[in-house]
């Protein structure tokens, strides 16, 4: 069974998240990730209505299959829009033509069709990990009744190595962490240096059930991405209390000569059972810098100081 690499690239940006990238610019980003030693790539049909999967698949076709780990997601099928208007997929923040629509399908047949269609877009015969994407948006009861057993069946049949859930919903992650048979959870923005709601509600159950966690959104959508906390936080500005905490964390980091983004990247890996951190990036230099930050030496005293100041648990 393939192990999950410590650092991954989240490929939403090469699906034109927030702004359009040319094919050449997207390839340059993926080249930078590969040259920086990144060997885990995470994508989804949702990302650019399949564009992320197609671009990632074309790039990885030039690489030895045994040298990388790839995950994608199920739960949304892409279906043609009758008489498309030519508008962009602005409602979902992707700069791509909205000539397809996302149709939630958590049935066993829908899960299998989603995987097969993703494999076709990727040009692969298998992926290493498969997540149910945002199950809270389609119904957690339906996920537990049909989608989770379908995922487990795909793994047991040898079609994937790891199966689980990817979500930013604490309720969805908490319920998934208690579902026997799942083995991998992607926790998006809920286990970060600035806030850790998953620490009490998800981590203990994951440990008890032998699940591994992948942390995504560790910069809290921009809050921790620079030494001066601010920028985008999920779908708006950061709550004042959270922003104040992030600024205090940045001050402590500065006392130890550590950048806030480096601390944000490495913090979550200190929490068992987190095994990987996945971060995005729309420019090659961002990807290179994140890989460098992940390798940065951070003194243990920094974490002790943050804990004494009650800035982390």
Image: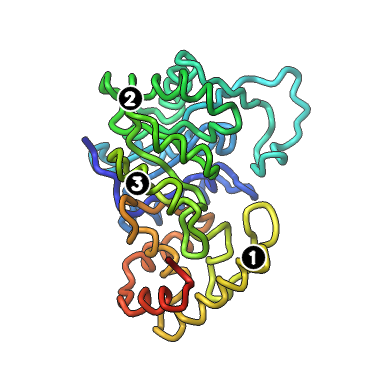
Residue furthest toward the right?
85
Q: Position of residue 175 (x, y in %)?
A: 46, 35
User: Is 263 displayed left or right of 138 in the figure?
Assistant: left
Badge 3 is on which residue? 40
Quarter of the rendering containing residue 101: top right
Image point (53%, 40%), residue name: 171
Q: Quadrant of the N terminus?
A: top left
Q: Secondary structure at mark 3?
A: strand
Q: Position of residue 193 (x, y in %)?
A: 47, 64
Badge 1 is on which residue? 231
Q: Is residue 89 above or below residue 114?
A: below
Front-most of residues 25 and 168: 168
Quarter of the rendering containing residue 208: top left
Q: Position of residue 220 (x, y in %)?
A: 55, 58
User: Is 171 displayed left or right of 292 in the figure?
Assistant: right
Cβ–Cβ under 8 Å for marks 3 and 2: no
Alpha carbon distance from label 3 to label 2: 17 Å
Front-most of residues 32 and 233: 233
Alpha carbon distance from label 3 to label 1: 27 Å
Badge 2 is on which residue? 125
From this viewpoint, is residue 179 visible?
A: yes
Q: Is residue 48 above or below residue 19?
A: above
Image point (42%, 20%), residue name: 116
Dot 3, how many residues are within 10 Å of its Cα: few (below 14), some (14-19), or many (20+)? many
Query: Can you tell which of label 3 and label 1 is closer to the viewer?
Result: 1
User: Is 213 displayed left or right of 145 in the figure?
Assistant: left
Residue furthest toward the top?
109
């Amino acid at each position: 069974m393939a192990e999950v690499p410590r650092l991954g690239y989240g490929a939403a940006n090469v699906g034109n998240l927030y702004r359009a990238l040319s094919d050449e610019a997207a390839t340059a980003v993926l080249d930078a990730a590969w040259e920086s030693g990144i060997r885990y790539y995470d994508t989804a049909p949702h990302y650019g209505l399949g564009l992320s999967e197609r671009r990632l698949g074309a790039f990885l076709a030039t690489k030895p299959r045994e040298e990388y780990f790839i995950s994608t997601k199920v739960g949304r099928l892409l279906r043609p829009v009758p008489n498309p208007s030519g508008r962009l997929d602005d409602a979902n923040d992707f700069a791509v033509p909205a000539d397809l629509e996302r149709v939630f399908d958590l049935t066993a047949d829908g899960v299998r069709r989603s995987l097969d269609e993703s494999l076709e877009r990727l040009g692969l015969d298998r992926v290493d990990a498969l997540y149910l994407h945002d199950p809270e948006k389609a119904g957690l009861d339906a996920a537990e009744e049909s989608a989770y057993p379908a995922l487990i069946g795909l793994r047991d049949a040898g079609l994937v190595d790891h199966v689980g859930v990817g979500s930013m919903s604490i309720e969805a992650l908490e319920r998934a962490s208690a579902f026997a048979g799942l083995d991998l959870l992607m926790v998006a923005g809920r286990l970060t240096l600035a806030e850790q709601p998953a620490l009490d509600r998800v981590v203990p159950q994951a440990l008890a059930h032998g699940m591994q966690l992948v942390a995504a959104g560790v910069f809290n959508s921009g809050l921790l991405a620079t030494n001066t906390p601010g920028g985008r936080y999920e779908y708006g500005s950061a709550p004042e209390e959270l922003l104040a905490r992030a600024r205090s964390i940045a001050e402590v980091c500065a006392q130890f000569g550590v950048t806030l983004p480096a601390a944000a990247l490495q913090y979550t890996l200190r929490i068992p059972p987190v095994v990987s951190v996945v971060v995005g990036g729309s420019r090659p230099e961002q990807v290179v810098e994140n890989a460098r930050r992940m390798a940065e030496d951070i003194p243990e005293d920094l974490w002790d100081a943050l804990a004494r100041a009650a800035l982390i648990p």
